[in-house]
Image (cartoon, helix red, strand yellow):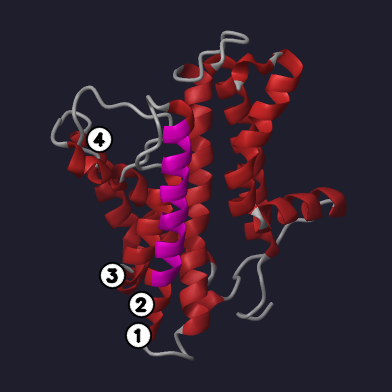
Amino acid sequence: MDAVSRYREIDIVRGIAVLMMVLFHTLFDINYFQIFSIDVSAGFWQYFAFATASFFLLIVGISLTISRAKAVSMISNHQLALKFVYRGAGIFLLGIVVTFGTWLYLKEGFIVFGILHLIGVSIMISPLFFRFKKFNFILGLLFIMIGYFLTTVTGPIWLLPLGIHPATFWSVDYEPLFPWSGIVLFGMGLGECLYPGGVRRFTLPKIPAFFGETLAYLGRHALIVYLIHQPIIILLLAAVFGTKLL
């Protein structure tokens, strides 16, 4: 497969992450609205949520290295950097829309710096890290270590994107740059290993066409699914269990 082709396996893995996200958020809503008691903040479901976010962020990192490899021979480094800044800014603005929507609906615990904010900023700063190639594995580990240290630190709310916040802060979705951008950097390092120069260097296993195409379709439209899935889940739960959810 040449470097300008779309890699189906990336869409499939992203599609798996989409299904995991929808499942977790359904269980979260069932618990949040006290329909049934499901502890999603500890044990298996907590690790499930971590795995879901990590899948998304790894794919972001891998996709960044492929996207750069496709464009590097066609545009200047300055234009390339602007491309990622504009792309990331667009996703970050969608995160702001989610912030506003959750503030209107939830009030307490609304999303201030969730996964869309994180992905947007990670994409915007990615041109600073492309030069490190496989060494992004080490930088990713450093980001994660800093993130674990910062869990013991409290500070003003304006440092919240870095992982520092007041002791009383809480949000239904909070992924600060430390440690979560470390997963994006891991993905960038992995992309250099699996797709050097933007070209796949491994053989794909066979996946049944129906499952593969379904997952790939979800993966290609992951952002749209992210934006609409929670309102749909809440409407379905309201229809089944009563309008009190609304």
Residue type, mark 3 in image: Leu
Locate residue 36, reporting x and y percent. Answer: 62, 9
The residue at which mark 4 appears reads as: 148
Q: Earlier in the sequence, mark 1 or mark 4?
A: 1
Q: Is residue 190 visible?
A: no
Residue 148 falls in which quadrant of the image? top left
The residue at which mark 2 appears reads as: 81
Does residue 245 lie above or below 124 as drawn? above
Q: Residue at x 53, y 30 (%)?
A: 48
Name the element at disc 3.
helix
Q: Mark 2 vs mark 3: give the one in front.
A: 2
Foreground pick, 79 / 236? 236
Residue 150 falls in which quadrant of the image? top left
Per the rendered image, the range of residues in magenta is 86-104
The residue at which mark 3 appears reads as: 128
Q: Residues within 10 Å of mark 2 (few under 14, many from 20)?
A: some
Q: Is residue 245 visible?
A: yes
2 and 1 marks in contact (CB < 8 Å) = yes
Q: Mark 1 vs mark 4: give the one in front.
A: 1
How far is the residue under mark 1 from the one under mark 3?
A: 11 Å
Residue 143 is one of the magenta-drawn residues: no
2 and 3 marks in contact (CB < 8 Å) = no
Does residue 118 lie above or below 76 as drawn? above
How far is the residue under mark 2 from the one under mark 3?
A: 9 Å
Name the element at disc 1.
helix
Which disc, if any, is residue 187?
none
Which disc, if any, is residue 77?
1
Q: How many marks?
A: 4
1 and 4 marks in contact (CB < 8 Å) = no
Residue type, mark 4 in image: Tyr
Q: What main secondary structure does the magenta stretch of the protein show?
A: helix
